Amino acid sequence: MKNREIAELLYEAADILEYQQVEWKPRAYRKAAQMIENLGEDVEKTYERKGKEGLTEIPGVGESIAAHIAEYLETGKVEKFEKLKEKAPSGTVELMEIRGLGAKKMKKLADALGIKTLSDLENAIQAHKIKRLEGFGEKTEENLAKAVEQYEKGHDRMSLGKALPLAEEIIAALKARCKSTCKIDLSKIIYTGSLRRMKETIGDIDILAEAEGEKEVLKVMDAFVSLPEVEQVMLKGSTKSSVILKEGTSIDLRVVPPESYGAALQYFTGSKEHNIELRNIAIREGYKLSEYGLYSKDSGEQVAGKSEEEVYNKLGLACIPPELRENREEIKAAAESALPKLVEAGDIRGDLHIHTSYSEGQGSLEAMVGRAEALGYEYIAITDHSRSQRIANGMEIETLKDQWKGIDEISKNFKIKILKGSEVEILRDGSLDYPEEILKELDVVVGAVHSGFLAPERKMTERIVIALENRCLDILSHPSGRLIGKREGYEVNFEKVFEAAAANRKILEINSQPSRLDLDDELILRAKAFDIKFSISSDSHSTSDLAFMRYGLGQARRGWLEKEDIVNTYPYSGLNEFFKKLKL
Ligand code: DGT
Ligand code: CA
Ligand code: CA
């Protein structure tokens, strides 16, 4: 899929145009970029099938933008954008991406302090030159410092939502290439590193494959570095090769013989901290542990290495699921046979946070329900935005009631149970965005904060606690409000939020959108101590988003959660206890 690439291209062009003070185009470009970013279908496929004409059917994409996209798909670049970039002073493109730094501010900074690049900006912040500028002040300087930090964090790591499909794509491509060009059947190949641990962001992608003998290894390496996706080969060796893909991601491939596959899988999955701890145990037990195997210190003989399980077991440990390998308490738990039985993909029976085209979703009610049923779910909750969420096309009460009728009508055509729900805005005073008589009609009420992010901690805590005390609320959605790499969460006292959730038996959401993953693993661990239940939800805005569930699942597993901790593993009848309004 090239959707993200295209969206980024449009965002970048919008930034440059804005800097040049072009009036309405930047907005149009951003709007189109946003639509494409969130589009369920593959833009390239649309173009192949229906040409430019097909592209203009995408909301926000007019003829000129469609022509740019077509040009990009045909040639890999857009002449007009290349020219724009050439004209823009170097460095400004990067600067434009700093949050809170619009075209006007940039111009002032350039005129007054000669700031033209990111490093100019960093130096000025460090020297506290910005707060002395008219119209900027201390707060602005602080915010810019934070934004720069966020930008840098966001740019050297990619989201799990980008890395995982990309790794799967490369693995499939490599397998296919090995098969077609050299008749090698790569039966053992897997992504390792932070990706296998399902960390929320990924530095680089690590892949491990098994092959026997020098010749075969070489052929696999050849196939890898000559994949069409590869832009640059950094290293090509007999055990490791490293490449950079055209879209910028670094990938390491390691190839090992069968007797080392398990040891290498263990080693390259990490984390480093977990590995160090494990190696210490090995030494204590009279072994030597490396990526090649577990060896007896005395005889030098290999005692394990074929499988991970073998390696852990020989060290007196149960095999630890990758998501737990962060040197938290997992090694101790493995030694005491007290590892949690983590929630699994097959345990999930429904999705409790779904948008449709009634608000800002792109799929129709029917399309969303149909996809959920195809996934084998037993139930889903339709939770479009409430009325005050104007930018997200929030629903007035009349529209909500129309939706209920729509749900009743289509219910007959599906086996899946459709819960009537809403993602209701938690207003600044903690009240909910629909009157009680409406909320009482809903099967499930998902409460969320989307505004007033700069409120002081006390205010935000109060706002959320009041909502948790509201008997109409069932689930607190994306509780921290963060957007990974873009925006930190609001300031809130989580101890108090968790206390209130526990006392009022409310469910906390683990939002699976790759840009959110909220609650994160650490907050999940903290909340679990309060004996709180969770839901893992896709927060889908299109049919393809339903697949985001696996990212949230990964965070739940990183947070040591078991099936019983998660309400959407319960059968439909079991939800009754939590959503008392469900008519059974
Ligand atoms: P990333 O790429 O920053 O998201 O994080 P990882 O965990 O994928 O780290 P990476 O790619 O540098 O290395 C992959 C794995 O290799 C890592 O999880 C553990 C192992 N590893 C790397 N360096 C060391 C090391 O110095 N000592 C040990 N024990 N293991 C290491
Ligand atoms: Ca890595
Ligand atoms: Ca690596």
Image (spheres, grey):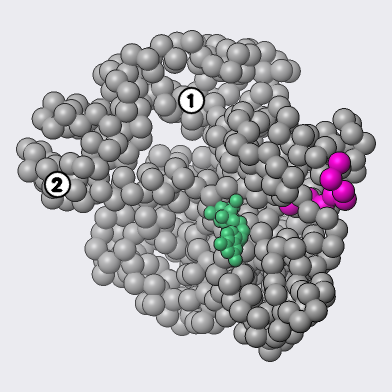
Q: Position of residue 455 (x, y in %)?
A: 26, 59
Rendered image quadrant of residue 286:
bottom right
Residue at 43%, 71% in the rendered image:
468
Q: CA distance from mark 2 to mark 1?
A: 33 Å
Tell me the magenta residue range. Answer: 208-215
Q: Looking at the image, which residue sits at the far right? A: 183
Vertical arrangement, residue 323 with respect to residue 156, above or below:
below
The N terminus appears in which quarter of the rendering?
A: top right
Residue at 74%, 45% in the rendered image:
238
**Horizontal placement of 110 versus 362: left or right?**
left
Residue at 89%, 34% in the rendered image:
182
Give whichever of 299, 428 is nearer the camera.
299
**Is label 1's Cβ within 8 Å of ligand 1?**
no
Label number found at residue 9: 1
Residue at 64%, 25% in the rendered image:
43
Question: Does the image show residue 44?
Answer: yes
**Horizontal placement of 560 versus 525: left or right?**
right
Q: Quick check: which quadrant has ligand 1?
A: bottom right
Label number found at residue 127: 2
Mark 2 or mark 1: which comes first in sequence? 1
